[in-house]
Image (cartoon, helix red, strand yellow):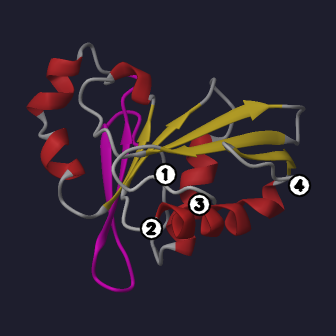
Amino acid sequence: MLPDKNPLVFRKVKLADLERIADAVLKAAGKLRVFAVSGELGAGKTTFIKAAGRVAGVTDSMSSPTFSIINEYKRKNGERLLHFDFYRIASEAEAADIGVEEYFDSGDYCFVEWPERIPSLLPEDCVNVRLTIESDTLRQIEISIHGREKKERI
């Protein structure tokens, strides 16, 4: 695992590295709570979000909300972690109809798979997480933080 700066890039990431990276991402995000997680099918988006959930204190079993669009989990501290999967939505209007912007404004952790399907609904101050397949067992994870609370150095 080799991190570079601006954006933060982790190369040769193994499954065993995910919780450590998720912890670093959550700490670097500070008060930001919306995470746009992108990557091709099979890149590990859901697996990364599960690792972030464990780090954030989710004790329930987590799964992809491909058919339900949103899964809600309680954290140990009583707050929620919300996991969205917009792969199956037909339009941004459909996402708006379920109240996605209210969820994003809730202050709860919100992890969004397929954020490219709702670009105008994402808050400008969100954390972008891009997963790229390097091999069957290795991934590259690139994190960039944009918006009002942008960090100079992660």
Question: Which callout, 3 or 2, points to the residue nearer the camera?
Answer: 2
Q: Which is nearer the N-term, disc 1 or disc 2?
A: 2
To which residue does mark 3 refer? Answer: 25
Query: Are the residues flagged by discs 1 and 3 in contact, CB closer than 8 Å?
Result: no
Say which residue appears at 47% left-offset and 78% top-offset. 57
Which of the pair 22/126 is nearer the observer? 126
Quadrant of the image occupied by residue 60: bottom left
Q: Secondary structure at mark 1?
A: loop
Depicted 123 relative to depicted 92: above or below:
below
Report the residue at 80% width, 40% height from top: 139
> For the residues marked 3 and 2, what is the alpha-carbon distance in whole angstroms?
9 Å
Residue 30 in magenta stretch: no
Q: Helix or strand or loop: what does disc 3 sit on?
A: helix
- What's the distance in space between the residues labelled 4 and 1, CA to CA? 26 Å
Q: Is residue 79 magenta?
A: yes
Q: Which residue is mark 2?
A: 30
Q: Residue furthest top?
A: 90
Q: Which of 124 and 86 lies nearest the eye of the viewer?
A: 124
The magenta stretch is: 65-88
The type of residue carrying mark 3 is Val
Tag 1: residue type?
Answer: Ser
